[in-house]
Image (spheres, grey):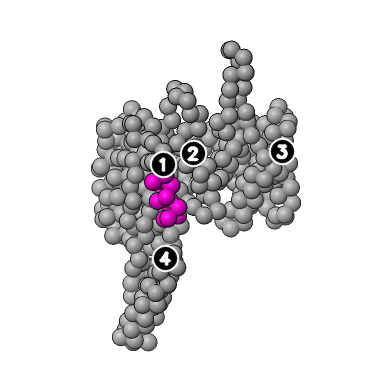
Amino acid sequence: MSVTMAAALRGSLVTLVKGLGGPQWQQVASRQLSVSAALRGAEVPPARADAIFKVTMVPGDGVGPELMTAVKDVFKAGDVPVEFEEFHLSEVQNMASEEKLEQVLTSMKNNKVAMKGKIHTPMEYKGELASYEMRLRRKLDLFANVVHVNSLQGYSTRHNNLDLVIIREQTEGEYSSLEHESVPGVIECLKIITREKSRRIAKFAFDYATKKGRSKVTAVHKANIMKLADGLFLQSCAEVAQLYPKIKYENIIIDNCCMQLVQNPYQFDVLVMPNLYGNIIDNLAAGLVGGAGVVPGESFSAEYAVFETGARHPFAQAVGRNIANPTAMLLSAANMLKHLNLEYHSHMVSDAVKRVIKQGKVRTGDLGGYATSDEFTRAVIANLGN
């Protein structure tokens, strides 16, 4: 087919998909250029998009705004077709209200995809037990948190070539915000475990393992002590495991899991667990490959996807010092682009980040270097498309 004919066909495609409107236009637009490229013999990179994707951005607290600036700078330099709707929501900076929360939720519901920094939760009790972070998750039903812990080539740690996935249920468990003082000096804190949500997160884990070609799922629990609550979670995982005979299933007690991760993390593939255990294991596993600054994360509901760092730390002591590592947030941004079917741009960003780390010339302080956040970001930009 001639270039002229291909161009005419591409113009017809554009007219057709624009007529669809809304999400259909976005879904088709992200693929249309790769179709015409194939007709012309792949003269341009595949999966470039003519559509602009709207994404909600909540920078959060601590170094969150600085990391989001790095993302915006890299996206601008890479001509990434994403437009951010930015909202500042913070409990510690007097930028939190019911109205602001509703604005963020409305944007997330419209866009379906968001990038979020850590919204710091104050320890002081001010009449509301559920933090804004928790309320966001519940209102969007972001039940599954996924953290892919992957060693970075060129940065050596005690355990190299790590590749494991932590899947955490994050709408109930110990983080149910149900506490009360039954008598003076006695606090009761309720841990909620339900069969429905335990089976849902177990199915998510096994589906993830199947889709990604993983061979084993390990349920993490404390059923030897919490016989009813964690017992129900463990029973639910075992029931779901029977539906996936090709995936090996094991279970492990949380304290032993922590020790095994430090001694021999290679024995694990996909781990699934309730809320609090997941929070602990996320941070422990991040420490195995370089710390909170290098591990991306994401949270899913049936409809929405939120991309954030894997280990959620505001890193408040680094605010304004230009020393935070943008790696985790940039890799999360790359995962978001992949979720939007922007494969070309996703690989462009993630490859640039990994290339900078592998070269070892520009590293932030957490990885043993002396580079500032801005210097690292500029190095990533310089490696875009290389």
Residue 135 marker:
2
Between the C-alphas of marks 2 and 4, the distance is 28 Å
Residue 383 marker:
none
Query: Does label 4 or label 1 sit earlier along the sequence?
Result: 4
- Magenta segment's dominant SS is helix
Q: Is residue 94 left or right of residue 185?
A: left
Query: Does label 2 or label 4 sit earlier along the sequence?
Result: 4
Do the numbered discs 1 and 2 sit on residues whose CB atoms are within 8 Å? yes
Between the C-alphas of marks 4 and 1, the distance is 24 Å
Amino acid type for the residue under numbered disc 4? Gly
Q: For mark 4, give the secondary structure.
A: helix
Instruction: Return the residue at label 3.
Output: 232
Between the C-alphas of marks 2 and 3, the distance is 25 Å
Q: For mark 3, give the secondary structure.
A: helix
* Residue closest to the eye, 68 or 77: 68
Amino acid type for the residue under numbered disc 3? Leu
Instruction: Return the residue at label 4.
Output: 22
Residue that sits furthest to the front in the current view: 99
Residue 152 horizontal/vertical position (percent): 43, 45
Query: Does label 3 or label 1 sit earlier along the sequence?
Result: 1
Query: Does label 2 or label 3 sit earlier along the sequence?
Result: 2
Q: Is residue 114 left or right of residue 201?
A: left
Residue 323 horizontal/vertical position (percent): 29, 35
Between the C-alphas of marks 1 and 2, the distance is 9 Å
Q: Residues within 10 Å of mark 4 (few under 14, many from 20)?
A: few
Residue 101 marker:
1
